[in-house]
């Protein structure tokens, strides 16, 4: 009997050990993304750590600032771009471009001091002859897996993806595919996204559209999916929706979900319009999208494959994304009117006229929304369905297109000042005074 007991115990232990070694990598509890977890206090990619515009709550996040108030540091940014700050450890990285020299670059700053660390050119020449005045040659936000930086750029009639290490050393560069807009030559804007061992790039225009996944370490192509041949500018996003990870895309007259492991389309619903720039948001099994051009429409779609449209209205949030929070959707339309809709049925809870135009997307932290318009005003309001409740208005710069980054108790703002035909950009680190003055 003792021998049998010992043998049984050994077998049980052996099975448990084998089971541990055979387990698949676990998904993040927040977003279901395997093998990729952002470090606390970082902002690793477009729309932040949870990919939905939600920052980590921090009671130290400032709500008041000006050029001479609550500025931890500021640093001049060379060139021009709309790329938002990406924060990884002690590094802040952004894309920028020099239109005179025809270069596209990634520039990095020290998170603690604002000192410029390096400035790596990723392309020379081949910039499109025309882009929309509200776009730039460096609009895509850099994505990072904690070891590498990934920058997507449009030049030489193609989309290219460059991987750098955190010291700015180029690791690889790939021509992802052609990009030759025929009718609306407004440039490129989509940011790369990360999933598992993949970096995924979307390119949509009226000549040829596609989505491609490359290996993060080598740049080797994993899969490629054809998209409708229409112009659109929005970035895809990965969300855990309707019980599975999905790549969610709005634009090209569709709202659609894709399997991020294979690029296979899971479902598609005819909705929104041809072109949009905002990134989808979601709640439970519902996704919310808005556009755009040539028509205006905001829509809620079930992402379970049924294709059901739950509700829609005629509001237009074209360049900016929305925020979904606690069952409600918050959006500022192109005219500068802020809305709160109930996510389940689209009921308008309130609306309030602010001031447009707006290109940056809102960010949520501590239950507050930070909404920056193009004129340099950042509105901070409470995300509540009861009524519009404004907390503060802050002025900085007079030309703002980049979305704020909020992490580690700071707000990072890429702003520009235009005066007498000249334009200069600055990266600001905004921090509460007690932290700014602390040793």
Image (cartoon, rainbow, N blue to C red):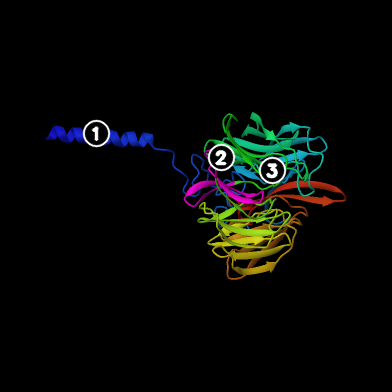
Q: Secondary structure at mark 2?
A: loop
Q: Secondary structure at mark 3?
A: loop
Measure how far apart labels 1 and 3 are at the Cα level: 58 Å
Q: Is residue 176 magenta?
A: no
Q: Is residue 239 magenta?
A: yes
Q: Main secondary structure of the magenta part?
A: strand
Q: Which residue is mark 2?
A: 263
Q: Which residue is mark 3?
A: 229
The image quadrant of residue 113 is top right
Residue at x-position 76% and y-position 33%: 156
The image quadrant of residue 190 is top right
Count of number-bearing discs: 3
Sequence order check: which comes first, mark 1 or mark 2? 1
Query: Which quarter shows the N terminus?
Result: top left
On the question of residue 53 being in view, the answer is no
- Nearest to the eye among marks 1 and 3: give it: 3
- Nearest to the eye among marks 1 and 2: give it: 2
Q: Which residue is mark 1?
A: 11
């Amino acid at each position: 009997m003792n021998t049998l007991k010992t043998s049984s115990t050994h077998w049980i232990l052996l099975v448990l050990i084998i089971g541990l070694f055979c387990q698949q990598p676990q998904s993040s509890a927040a977003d279901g993304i395997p093998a990729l977890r952002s470090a606390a206090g970082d902002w690793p990619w477009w729309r932040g750590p949870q990919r939905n515009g939600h920052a980590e709550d921090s009671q130290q996040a400032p709500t008041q600032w000006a050029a001479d108030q609550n500025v931890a540091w500021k640093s001049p940014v060379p060139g021009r771009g709309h790329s938002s700050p990406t924060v990884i450890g002690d590094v802040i990285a952004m894309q920028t471009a020099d239109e005179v020299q025809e270069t596209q670059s990634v520039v990095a700053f020290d998170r603690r001091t604002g000192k410029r660390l390096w400035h790596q050119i990723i392309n020379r020449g081949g910039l499109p002859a025309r882009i929309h005045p509200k776009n730039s040659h460096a609009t895509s936000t850099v994505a990072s897996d904690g070891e590498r930086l990934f920058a997507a750029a449009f030049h030489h009639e193609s989309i290219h993806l460059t991987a750098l290490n955190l010291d700015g050393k180029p690791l690889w560069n790939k021509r992802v595919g052609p990009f030759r807009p025929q009718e609306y030559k407004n440039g490129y804007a989509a940011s790369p996204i990360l999933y598992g061992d993949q970096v995924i790039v979307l390119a949509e225009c009226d000549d040829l559209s596609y989505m491609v996944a490359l290996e993060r370490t080598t740049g080797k192509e994993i899969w490629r999916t054809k998209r409708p041949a229409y112009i659109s500018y929005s970035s895809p996003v990965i969300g855990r929706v309707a019980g599975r990870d999905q790549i969610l895309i709005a634009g090209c007259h569709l709202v659609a979900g894709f399997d991020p492991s294979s690029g296979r389309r899971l479902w598609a619903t005819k909705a929104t319009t041809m072109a949009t720039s905002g990134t989808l948001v979601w709640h439970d099994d519902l996704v919310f999208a808005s556009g755009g051009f040539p028509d205006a429409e905001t829509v809620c779609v079930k992402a379970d494959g049924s294709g059901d449209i739950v509700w829609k209205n005629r509001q237009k949030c074209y360049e900016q994304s929305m925020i979904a929070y606690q069952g409600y959707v918050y959006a500022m339309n192109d005219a500068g009117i802020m809305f709160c809709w109930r996510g389940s049925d689209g009921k308008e809870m309130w609306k309030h006229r602010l001031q447009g135009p707006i290109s940056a997307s809102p960010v949520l932290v501590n239950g507050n929304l930070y909404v920056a318009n193009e004129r340099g005003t950042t509105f901070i309001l409470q995300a509540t369905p009861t009524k519009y409740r404004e907390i503060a208005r802050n002025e900085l710069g007079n030309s703002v297109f980049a979305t704020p980054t909020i992490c580690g108790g700071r707000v990072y703002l890429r702003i520009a000042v235009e005066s007498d035909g000249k334009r200069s950009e600055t990266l600001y680190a905004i921090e509460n005074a007690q932290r700014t003055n602390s040793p």
